[in-house]
Amino acid sequence: MPCVWPDGSLSTSGRLMLAAVQTDSTAEDVAEVTGMPLYRARSSLRQLLAAGYISEDGERFSQTEQGAEKVKSGS
Amino acid sequence: MTTIEEPEVRAALPRLNEPAPAFEAVTTHGPLRLSDFERSWLILFSHPADFTPVCTTEFIAFAEIYPELQKRGCELIGLSIDSLYSHIAWVRNIEEKAGVKIPFPVIADLDRKVATAYGMVMPGESKTEASRCVFVIDPKGILRAMIYYPLSVGRNMDEFVRLIDALQTGDENHVATPANWRPGDKVVMPAPNTVELAEERAGEGLECIDWYLCKKSL
């Protein structure tokens, strides 16, 4: 279940994960907010990072402008 | 002309109490790395092939114990040398025919990288399938237990839950667990390793058969 499709659109879990990323969220925070297992949060964050929807600072993640637009558009 | 036989190249098996071989694999839950499971216990198990009878009974049984494993902070991940599309079709078929949703990811190890790293293929049994292997990996990524079953014998799920209970109890209390131990049973104290400690052990008020075998309740 990749959370980001090759065209940049998000799966249901991908949208859920991206929406759960607030400023300075950890993978544990995202897992807790979404109710997903921690391994799923870590894997999804890696995919959202590669797609440019979030940025990383150590173990903390934040939405990028592109990610915030994606959340707004709901696609 | 003399034929020179080439020595058989044998894959090294992983070893207990050493870091579990790292992997990054395609799974039914997306690309996953072993490090994604850090800070959780993990049971990595292999099965010979999708859409086969014993494996199907095992998948249903693994799905049944998954909530118990989760209560213990333990995740599950399956593996076979099959394609991702075969895995997806099989888990959908299990849900359709048996009414059981498979909640854990399954590695599609077509290139055998993970199976080779963990010594899952036993050529004496099958050169193309993984045997029924079970690896218990702790939250620090250390391989703590390995169990291998032959192709023809479905695994006993109770044992895996018991094994997790025993490992966690041992870690938390610095004790060992005796044969057939279950949570709530007495545990085994480490044997004294000096004469002085052996003499002192006798006065500790434990249930002892002799100085080297003492049990206590937790």
Image (cartoon, coloured by chain):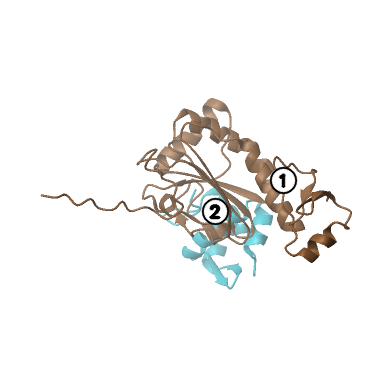
Chain colours: A cyan, B brown
Note whether residue B65 is visible.
no
Callout 2 and callout 1 share a chain: no
Residue B201, image quadrant: bottom right
Report the front residue among B106 and B158: B158
Residue hosting label 2 = A14
Note whether residue B53 is visible.
yes
Percent from the top left, x then y, of residue A72?
A: 58, 59
Q: Amino acid at mark 1?
A: Pro
Q: Chain of mark 1?
A: B
Q: List the single residue furthest toward the bottom.
A: A57
Percent from the top left, x then y, of residue B180?
A: 70, 40
Specify few, some or many for label 2: CA neighbours under 10 Å numbering under 14, 14-19, or 20 or more: many
Q: Residue at x 63, y 53 (%)?
A: B41
Report the front residue among A64 and B126: B126
Q: Chain of mark 2?
A: A
Percent from the top left, x then y, of residue B3?
A: 16, 49
**For the image shown, how many numbered marks are present on the structure?**
2
Above-or-below relation of B95 to A61? above
For discs 2 and 1, the disc positioned in front in the rendered view: 1
Residue hosting label 1 = B178
Q: Amino acid at mark 2?
A: Gly
Q: Residue at x 71, y 46 (%)?
A: B71
Q: Residue at x 60, y 68 (%)?
A: A62
| Distance in Å between CA atoms under marks 2 and 1 | 46 Å
Above-or-below relation of B125 to B8? above
Report the front residue among B217 and B198: B198
| Element at label 2 | helix
